[in-house]
Amino acid sequence: MEKKESRPLPHELERMASKERQKHLEERMREIIDYAYEKAPAVKERFDRAGIKPIEIHNVKNLEMIPMLRKDDLIALQKANPPFGGYLAVPIDSLERIYQSPGPIYDPQRKRGFGTGGGMGSDFGKGQIVMNTWSYHVTPAGLGVDQLLRSMGFTVVPMGTGNTELQVQVMHDLKVHGFVGTPSFLNTIINRAEEMGYNFKKDFNLKWAMVGGEMGGELLRKLFQEKYGILCMGGDTYATSDVGTVATGCEKQSGMHITTDAVVEIVDPATGKQLGLGEEGEVVVTPFDEVYPLIRFGTGDLSMMTDESCGCGRTTPRLTKILGRSGEAVRVRGMFVHPKQTDEVIAKFPDIRRYQLVVTRPQNRDDMVLKVELANGAIDKEKLKNALDKSFKDTCKVRFDRVEFVTEGSIAEGAKRIVDERVY
Ligand SMILES: [Zn+2]
């Protein structure tokens, strides 16, 4: 694909008026669809089977016509047609690297790697040593981030995962400025350093951390900043090994700005139809990727989009946070209920031994019953019901219809916590 001379740079796209940016993104979207249809046999086959021509896709809304490509589809396609399932749009011998992620799924290295550097120059990190603790083996995270950091001028120590004591030693000896990895691993390193007798704040030089990759990192970020004076940069980054970076946090830490290198949709996982701002749905990505153009890749992750203005000056919409995996959640009356949320509710009630949430759909209305097995049958059930109702409503933002107390053993050990029995 020829790059057009007039094309705005990522940091320009990130700051322009939404309508204007949309125009540019849709132009690139049409280009990548034409290109993928021509170069990647699996894309052509998918379009042909659905009776769609690339020329029919003019705007983001039109993407709904294209069936979503799910991780399971990709696994099956790769198995039937190894290694890339017909999605590779360039000759295989032109690839620099090939990665593998669980599935197994093979991922060709893409040019853009992980993150965009936010338009920062190559001198940005000059004179600073950074420890990269993402895995360098097989998966794309370590090498992708390594490439990005070096392009920004940082000196990188390719630590990879594990070996906490060695990490402590290197961080101390090299007076490392920056840490890249998960918040929990940084926490482990700090704890180990303290166990080894160091005073982390005094004996180490760690000034900032770019942490992400797991849910619930907010508390640790706060701890790093307040207790150790470590500036947590960039908030979270949301990337998958299949489509690369989807969204990156900014210094305002109010969600993750969506990349300008892809079209990102939030859809109802059941129908593939796009949802509005502020509605929970599955993140679907169409990266502008000439190597591996996965069109409408369903990440299986649930999130929500907002276009409220951000103090950092970027005008790109943001993902609020990743709410969970769509395969485990059910959408009831417009809201997702996730086993993580129901576990959180039930954990507050020690008298409950097991539970199961059953969703049915009599007379075209979602009906939700919370089945409960008690550890102690003598308790005040009415009181428990009311407390459950309140707690469930607070956490899941939707109400169950009733509680059903079932006899001991009715719910099998290891049974699914949320059962969807709806028939449409
Ligand atoms: Zn921002």
Image: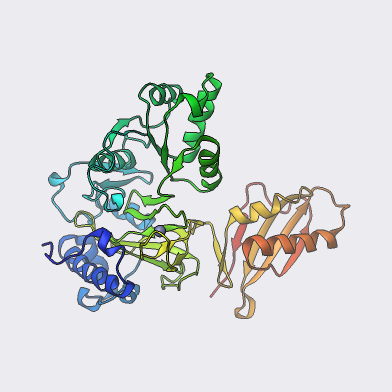
Above or below for 52 versus 349? below
Q: Left or right: 37 with respect to 381?
A: left
Q: Residue furthest bottom?
A: 363
Q: Which image quadrant is residue 159 in?
A: top left
The foreground one among 37 and 63 is: 63
Q: How is the image coloured?
A: rainbow
Which residue is rendered at x = 29% and y = 33% of the image? 156
Q: Is residue 250 left or right of residue 55?
A: right
Left or right relative to 234: residue 136: left
Q: State the residue at coordinates (22%, 75%).
A: 53
Q: Is residue 79 left or right of residue 377?
A: left
Indicate which quadrant contains ligand 1.
bottom left
Q: Eyeballing the image, is 56 above or below 166?
A: below
Q: Residue at x 80, y 47 (%)?
A: 375
On the image, the x and y values in percent for residue 92 come to: 15, 47
Can the viewer see residue 142 in this picture?
yes
Judging depth in this view, the residue of 122 and 296 nearest the camera is: 122
Where is residue 315, by image quadrant? bottom left
